[in-house]
Image (cartoon, grey):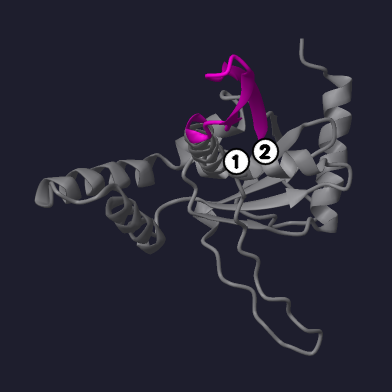
Amino acid sequence: MGEIIQEEKSKGGKKRPKHHSTHIDMTPMVDLMCLLITFFMLTTAFSKSKVMEIVLPEKIKKNDKVEPPKIAESRTINIILGPENKVFWYPGRVKDSKNPPALQETDYSDEGIRKILLDRNKLLSKKVAAFKEQTTKENPAITRDSLLANIKRFKKADDSGPIVLIKAYKEARYANIVDIIDEMEICSIVRYALVDINYVEDEMVKTAMARSTSNPKQ
């Protein structure tokens, strides 16, 4: 609080000091505070970190006898994350461990593993598009959240989409795991799982790496 002293002449000719109290108008500060609060609230809402949700299976105890789920071989595609940002894949399963199939090499580009997954997922994508069109036609007022929930249930009930088994070689990078899971979301792959690589596939990667080294891409 400040004080201003102003001299004032009295009737006798003497000057008498006149006191004026001063104060600060806080009204503009209140408006500024409200603007700052609104700004920080919006900034916090828009800058939420994106979390990748992964549902992991329950850990099996040593004494538990659990049979592995049966997977259709025609729908299965094995993706092996190799060293040096390389990606290898093969369809189906290894029928003969002494004569395993040759791994096919690709990368994380649009024309690489993404194109392979999209080609494998064409049938399901067409079904989802038809289901979406039919749902919006029957119920034009359906909300976006309800539509996405219906599509999600439709995908889970489908039995034609690919089943992707993701396996990481010992020299693969953690960033590659994030990249391949991103590709699952981009390509709308419904069924995929992180699986341990076995000894045969480990040897298959070594063979593929040796072949890639001897025949480098131009």
State the image quarter where residue 150 is shown.
bottom left
Quadrant containing the N terminus is: top right
Q: Position of residue 29 (x, y in %)?
A: 54, 33
Q: Are marks 2 and 1 in contact (CB under 8 Å)?
A: yes
Q: Is residue 161 above or below residue 85?
A: below
Q: Nearer the viewer, residue 204 or 61?
A: 61
Q: Which residues are magenta?
A: 1-28
Evaluate whether residue 98 shows in this view. no
Please tell me whether residue 73 belongs to the stretch shown in magenta: no
Q: Position of residue 114 (x, y in %)?
A: 56, 32
Amino acid carrying mark 1 in the image: Asp
Amino acid carrying mark 2 in the image: Asp
Quadrant containing the C terminus is: top right
Q: Residue at x 53, y 34 (%)?
A: 26
Q: Position of residue 74 (x, y in %)?
A: 50, 53
Disc 1: which residue: 182
Q: CA distance from mark 2 to mark 1?
A: 5 Å
Q: Position of residue 23 (x, y in %)?
A: 57, 33
Disc 2: which residue: 179
| 72 displayed left or right of 68 | left
Q: Which mark is residue 167?
A: none
Crowding at dot 1, Cα within 10 Å, few <14 / some 14-19 / many 20+, comes out as few
Please tell me whether residue 3 belongs to the stretch shown in magenta: yes
SS of the residue under disc 2: helix
Disc tally is 2
What residue occupies the far top of the structure in this picture? 218
